[in-house]
Image (spheres, rainbow, N blue to C red):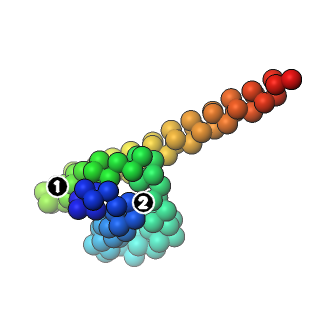
Amino acid sequence: MRHAQDNDPHEFAKADFAFHQTIVAAAGNNTLIRLYDMLQFAYWTYASTILTGYNLPYQARRHYKILDALNTGNPDLIAKTLQDHIEELIDRITTHYSERQAQSEVNSAAKVEEP
């Protein structure tokens, strides 16, 4: 949370990546670890930060939900919380790029209509 409060996106992204990497390693699943590395989640961590408009306190709060779930020891709650975390990011990325695509199409159409 310190990097979020300091509004330091670079250090926040590094801490965010380390947070995710720690959780993946703690799962002790070699397939998950390889998949995490293969899918380059460092990029997704950075993209998530950008897509929230660098709202770092919001990003940090999202991770406290995960810590709270982990602290319960309830595997169903942990799984649901992690799933929600991932799906929220996917929704944000999908919406962002859909909006960009729509704007690009509007801009292209406007250029065609120009005399």
In the image, is residue 68 above or below residue 27?
above
Task: Identify the amino acid type marked 1.
Answer: Asp
Locate the C terminus and report the quarter of the image it occupies. Answer: top right
**Which residue is identified by label 1?**
68
Snapshot quadrant of residue 27 = bottom left
Q: Where is residue 108 in the image (x, y as percent from the top left)?
A: 75, 33
Q: Considering depth in this image, is 1 or 23 the residue closer to the camera?
A: 1
Q: Residue at x 81, y 23 (%)?
A: 113
Q: Residue at x 25, y 56 (%)?
A: 5
Q: Where is residue 77 in the image (x, y as percent from the top left)?
A: 21, 51
Q: Residue at x 56, y 35 (%)?
A: 99
Other-residue count near label 2 (Cα within 10 Å), few / some / many at <14 / 14–19 / ≥20: some
Q: Which residue is drawn at 63% across and 33% down?
A: 103
How many marks on residues?
2
Tell me the tag on residue 45. Answer: 2
Q: Position of residue 84 (x, y in %)?
A: 33, 47
Tell me the tag on residue 42. Answer: none
The single residue placed furthest to the right in the displayed view is 115
**Secondary-structure class at tag 1:** helix
Looking at the image, residue 93 sits to the left or right of residue 10; the answer is right
Looking at the image, residue 9 sits to the left or right of residue 112; the answer is left
Other-residue count near label 1 (Cα within 10 Å), few / some / many at <14 / 14–19 / ≥20: few
Tell me, yes or no, if residue 76 can be seen here: no
In the image, is residue 52 above or below residue 8?
above
The single residue placed furthest to the left in the displayed view is 72
Q: Where is residue 112 in the image (x, y as percent from the top left)?
A: 82, 28
Q: Considering depth in this image, is 53 or 63 the residue closer to the camera?
A: 53
**Secondary-structure class at tag 2:** helix
Give the mark nearest the N terminus, 1 or 2.
2
Task: Identify the amino acid type marked 2.
Answer: Thr
Tell me, yes or no, if residue 86 can be seen here: yes
